[in-house]
Image (spheres, rainbow, N blue to C red):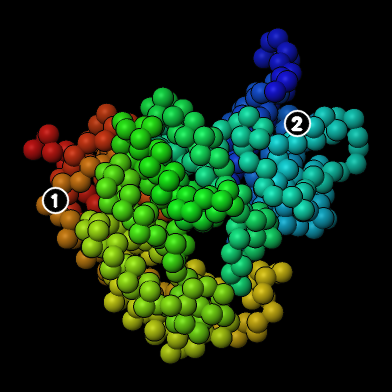
Amino acid sequence: MDTKFTPGAESRPHFYIESLGCSKNTVDSTGIATLLQYQGYLPTTEPELADVLIVNTCGFIATARAESLEVISQLSAARRPGQKIIAAGCWAQRDPDYLLELLPELDAVIGTRSWPALPALLELLQTRQERLIYTEDDHPTILPEAVGVPGYALNSEVSAFLKIADGCDRRCAFCAIPMIKGRNVSRSLEAIVADARQLQEQGVLEINLIAQDTTYYGYDLGMQDGLAILLEQLVTTLPELPWIRILYAYPGYLTPRLLAVMAAQPQILSYIDIPLQHAHPTILRRMRRPADMMEVRRTVAELRRLLPEVCLRTTFIVGFPGETAEEFETLLDFVTELQFDRVGVFKYSEEVGTPAADYPDDVPEQIKDERLAVLMLKQQAISLAKNQALVGKELPVLLEGTGDGFTIGRSYRDAPEVDGLVLLPGELPVNRIVPVRITEALVYDLKGVLVDAL
């Protein structure tokens, strides 16, 4: 790649980037930052020092768009003459014209599939006065290796998200992601392994594999059991990497080979995130999701047989159009029966352009709020009981930070940014995995002490 470095930091333009939304956006923001640095820009953490302000927006649900709007407005209110403000990411891809109309302070929008063209866009902004839109509606997501930047993002000094694919071939009735991201595009095995190797060389101890659907990895490349093959390659190539975590598995795609690899390789954490979204077959069919709940039960039983210490996470949507009180009770009973370790719950939010947007949203907001609260209360009791069962046991814990007289870490049961923490007394050396004896259980978090200190 041609670079445009100029001697002396004083003469080089600076950029500030704020990343919103999910970990996949975080990876894209890292790619944007790397690309701009290749082109001679310098990063800054202070917006007032930047020549270019970039907000990598989330457009998944209304609350995420509201957050994006607030951040752009705050940056705009404090902008100085000559600063450019650009909206990137999912909301920019989904509603570019609306964004420019809504936010007259924006100089440009650039979509999820077009951010590698950001340097060219910035050049145009120097010579042209009109506001610009860069989106690609008819092409698959451009993946990081296509522009020579890594497909990962650090979330601490020793933990990272590694993107293995982008886009989604599913057509869930409530989800706008396929409209925003396009079809599933898997990265090559070689690129993913190269990124993983680089992360290990940087001292990373935990790699979290992410995609809209990790279990669909490789199908577009003609691979069967692509995720299992990738995991085998990673553990063979990087035998000293301690932790590999799988996020965002699709129901029905946890194949026997994948489960066998997970069971055979201690580097692959006994943690699996399977967003189920509901438990009543009628609602699931309306959601255009897998509706065979007996198959889900068999999969969970097989996971627990092969991985006795497995931590199971899932997510559910309450208040989906047409959800009756009886169907919600089915979901409550299912959560009681399956005893998931981690559960996230969301209220249904209508997304324009999705099939569900044409359904009558006949569940009042108050009922949605009540159902969310009831389900979370039930899961809190389950979570507390699960954590109480760990008291007295030893867990390996990745220590990542200190503060207020505590050291903060995570066990294999805790994915970064979404799950709980393990708290240890005292401010201990961090960026290492240590054995911890669990001494106290909270609803979501654990407390413990170093085994060596006992």
Q: Residues within 10 Å of mark 1 (few under 14, many from 20)?
A: few
The amino acid beneath tag 2 is: Pro
* Residue name at image x 38 percent, y 50 percent: 415
The residue wearing badge 2 is 119
- What residue appears at the point 91 percent right and 34 percent down from the top-left corner? 128
Q: From the top left corner, tell me how far across and down residue 409 is, in percent.
A: 30, 42
Q: Nearer the viewer, residue 87 or 339?
A: 339
Camera-side residue: 226 or 342?
A: 226
- Could you tell me which quadrant the C terminus lies in? top left
Frontmost residue, 81 versus 164 = 164
Tell me: 108 left or right of 38. Answer: right
Q: Position of residue 248 (x, y in %)?
A: 46, 56
In the image, residue 191 above or below residue 315: above
Identify which amino acid the numbered label 1 is placed on. Lys
Secondary structure beneath dot 1 equals loop
Residue 200 is left or right of residue 54, and the answer is: left
For the N terminus, the quadrant is: top right
Task: Find residue 137 and report its horizontal and vertical position in percent.
Answer: 77, 53
Q: In the image, 28: left or right of 84?
A: left
Name of the residue lying farthest toward the top? 7
Q: Tell me the residue at 33%/73% (across/down).
A: 297
Residue 97, disc: none
